[in-house]
Image (cartoon, helix red, strand yellow):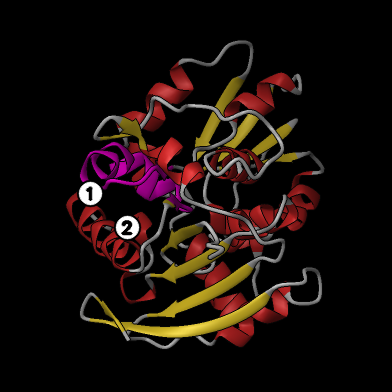
Amino acid sequence: MERMPCIGVFDSGAGGLGVLSACLKLRGGVRYYYLADIAHAPYGSRTEREIASYVREGLEIFKDLGADAAVLACNTATAVCVEEMRRAFPFPVVGTEPAVRLAERAGCQQALVLVTPRTARCARFRALLDRGRGCAFTVFSPPRLASAIEASLTEGSRLRLAEHLPRGQFDGVVLGCTHYTLVGEEIAAFYAAPVFDGNLGTARRLLSLAGRDGRPLVGISDHRMGDLTTNKCFTQSCEYKTKNEVIFLNSSKKYNKLQYEQMFSTRFGVEFRQIFTGGGKVF
């Protein structure tokens, strides 16, 4: 019997849709579970302990659903607890990081890095910047931009970027929050500069675990379960169909999947479904 590989996509809200979009643009045959933890959003103002607790709850739901891999489609969650989650779960957990290397490779000399306040304080993010070469990065943490983008997408509120972004002359902007990538074109126009995000790289990394990006498997020693890496278990246990499937998991605050469908159904041949979660159980 054919079995689709199942991937969980976790974010505090709509930001992870950019990662999901990048995945859908690559080769198909994957079932995606999308979980938006809107009950606790935004994560940028939460403590590290709170964020780790919320992420663990989300990944437990993916585990109960039989997911083969998961992605923290949230830069803040990645910076805070991706290593902890990799130790805690038997499937690969992929993170999302600010694409500062892409800005460097593009030849940027003075780049702005937009991240949430929590990401800016994380040692993992600071270490990422410290490894940089040849580009001066200005880090700015707009305290309410992620929430404003979420409200714009889900409630139709007007988004005024000038109220959230710093003035300055930059030759590149790194979007270090997946929410920011949803308005990447607008941010690029605001600064008249190219923007860089890690969505495509994250999607390729994630789908490489299933051999679904047309490239050789990478990182097969990252995650171990018994005598096999979980990456190999993932590829060996799955036979592939060609059509993707997206299932939205609703939290206690109902998130209308039609808002997601409007973003994707016109661009991708994807089957959308919805199931509800509550109290850590799926029903």
Residue 12 position, x and y percent, is 41, 64
Task: Give 199 or 279, whichever is nearer the viewer.
Answer: 279
- Residue 92 colored magenta? yes
**Mark-to-mark CA distance, 2 and 1:** 9 Å
Residue topped by disc 1: 48
Give the quadrant of residue 257.
bottom right
Q: Amino acid at mark 2?
A: Ser
Mark 1 and mark 2 in contact (Cβ < 8 Å)?
no
Q: Is residue 17 left or right of residue 184?
A: left
Q: What's the mark number on residue 45?
A: 2
Residue at the spot 64% in from the left edge and 42% down from the top edge = 197
Q: Is residue 58 above or below residue 261?
A: above
Residue 37 appears anywhere in the view: yes
Residue 217 position, x and y percent, is 57, 30
Residue 115 appears anywhere in the view: no
Residue at the spot 20% in from the left edge and 80% down from the top edge = 279
Q: Is residue 60 above or below residue 219?
A: below
Task: Give 123 or 273, whichever is nearer the viewer.
Answer: 273
Q: Please identify the residue farthest to the front as the structure is shown.
A: 1
Q: Amino acid at mark 1?
A: Glu
Task: Give 97 or 250, whichever is nearer the viewer.
Answer: 250
Residue at the spot 55% in from the left edge and 61% down from the top edge = 4
Give the quadrant of residue 19.
bottom right
- Residue 248 colored magenta? no
Q: Quadrant of the C terminus?
A: bottom left
Q: The magenta stretch spans which residues?
A: 70-94
Q: Is residue 27 above or below residue 106?
A: below
